[in-house]
Amino acid sequence: MKVLLTGANGYIGRRLKQTLLNEDVALRLLVRNPKSLDPNLGVEVAKGDTFNPHSLERALEGIDVAYYLIHSLQHKNYKELDRQSAQNFLDAAIKKGVKRIIYLGGLGVKEHASEHLLSRIETGEILSSKPEQIETVWIRAGVIIGSGSSSFEIIRHLTEKLPVMVTPKWVKTLAQPIGVDDVITYLNASKDLDIKGNLVVDIGSEKMTYKEMMLGCASALGLRRWIFPLPVLTINLSSYWLNFFTPVPYTVARSLIEGLSSEVVIQNDNAKQYFPQIHPIGFEAAVRKSIQEMEENQVFSRWSDAGGGQDMWERQHKDDPSSAVLMDRQSMNIDSIPKESVYCTFCSIGGKEGWFGYDWLWEIRGWMDKMLGGAGLNRGRRDTLKLRIGESVDFWRVEDLIPNERLLLYAQMKVPGKAWLEFKIKGNELVQTAYFYPRGLWGRIYWYSLTPVHYLVFKNMIQSILRKADTMNKQRSSTNLL
């Protein structure tokens, strides 16, 4: 069986990719940026995207089963993009003789769905619109619980930070959550189903309200929490509230809040009928497993991995740090410190490690970003030591990564322009550069007003990186001697 996986760098896609690698299939990945993949995967990689028909057709050549794990939620016109993407994919799949499309969408009834859920339903309808030419297995899930999932991150952050919660009335809405491992199991099994025509499969565990989920999460965390729903909190207020206390930016928070007003419960029993061997674990068990993965630093993927996708693709082709007109550059001799130690040190930046000094200034900048509807510092990082291209580090995203040589971060904070932060080992020097491409007059005012702060923060940053790298190297040398 020849399988194409789209969305291989996304939250679900990364996990499904690992599962498919252990299957007896010939796997091909469709990605915009091949550099974002591990070169040692040993799979075929097709460069392109669903908005480029030619690259899409090349990727689908000879494919039996194609997984469609794509959405454009972080774009303002995501509904139009989702429709166009799905139609392009369907047309190309039919043209190339693909036998089956497997799509992961959301639970919900079309008549009562929010705009976000409606877009997911419309995507499924487009992919299922020509059963006489190609069959589609449409898996529908509601709240996905797993380490790094947006749903779990929101529930966990609210539960940990707020002992008493005054919440909107949506906390009484019913849903059927499901663990991420069970979602992957259903998706993997769907490629081997012996069926003819289309199939819609609703999946989930027990039926519960969002209030019960938060209290269940509190119980799994060993916390006591009190929740008081109020009918007066509007969607706007709820979105700002969610943005302020969780890692999601305002645009994503608003779409999620709108969706929370709609029940997302199972509408058919096809999961039991066609997948009798799969028994989803309960909500609290899924939460405990997620917490254990976080504590053991085993978070495999996160909701913010390669988020949006298209914006990164456009930057890689149109923008780069060399286009910046303003910069702050610091360089220091690394002396006898091995390059490997320096590289590992600056790759540990962000998250719990902080920003090598003046963390209180970064915290202020994070809160300012939250107030403007940005991601802030709440996203942290997936792993305390390892990075990969496309993933988030607080309000930055990893744009480039060259082992023992370079780390390039792109700013996703709210700024009047575009910003990058680069660490590069050149010869016997560490060169640290902050690049900024201002947008109009306000962009320049923003940069120059922060010049004194930049001087303190960035000068201290490179010094701290080398101090820590030197300490790390000496500790390793002492350990080896022992």
Image (tube, rainbow, N blue to C red):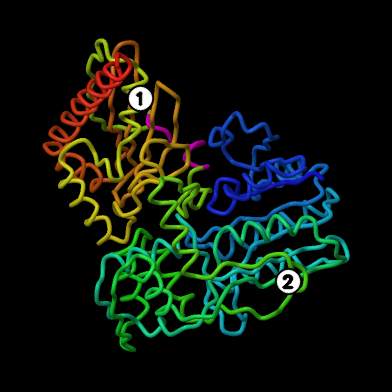
Q: Quadrant of residue 276?
A: bottom right
Where does residue 229 sit, x and y in percent of width and height? 33, 85
**Quadrant in which the C terminus is drawn:** top left
| Residue in the foreground of this view, choosing between 367 and 321 | 367
- 246 relative to 1 in the view: left or right: left
The crowding category of the residue bearing disc 1, from other C-alpha atoms within 10 Å (few below 14, some 14 to 19, many at least 20), is many
- 470 relative to 67 in the view: left or right: left
Residue 116 sits above or below residue 435 on the image: below
* Residue name at image x 37 percent, y 78 percent: 235
**Quadrant in which the N terminus is drawn:** top right
Q: Which secondary structure type mostly characterizes the magenta part of the structure? A: helix
Please tell me the numbered disc located at residue 343.
1
Residue, disc 2 = 200
Is 326 magenta? The answer is no
Residue most toward the front?
482
Q: Quadrant of residue 109?
A: bottom right
- 47 relative to 348 in the view: left or right: right
Where does residue 302 sit, x and y in percent of width and height? 47, 51
Residue most toward the bottom?
231
Where does residue 2 sit, x and y in percent of width and height? 79, 44
The residue range painted magenta reads 313-321
Mark 2: amino acid: Val
Mark 1: amino acid: Tyr
| Badge 1 element | helix
Inter-mark Cα distance, 2 to 1: 48 Å
Is 314 magenta? The answer is yes
| Badge 2 element | strand
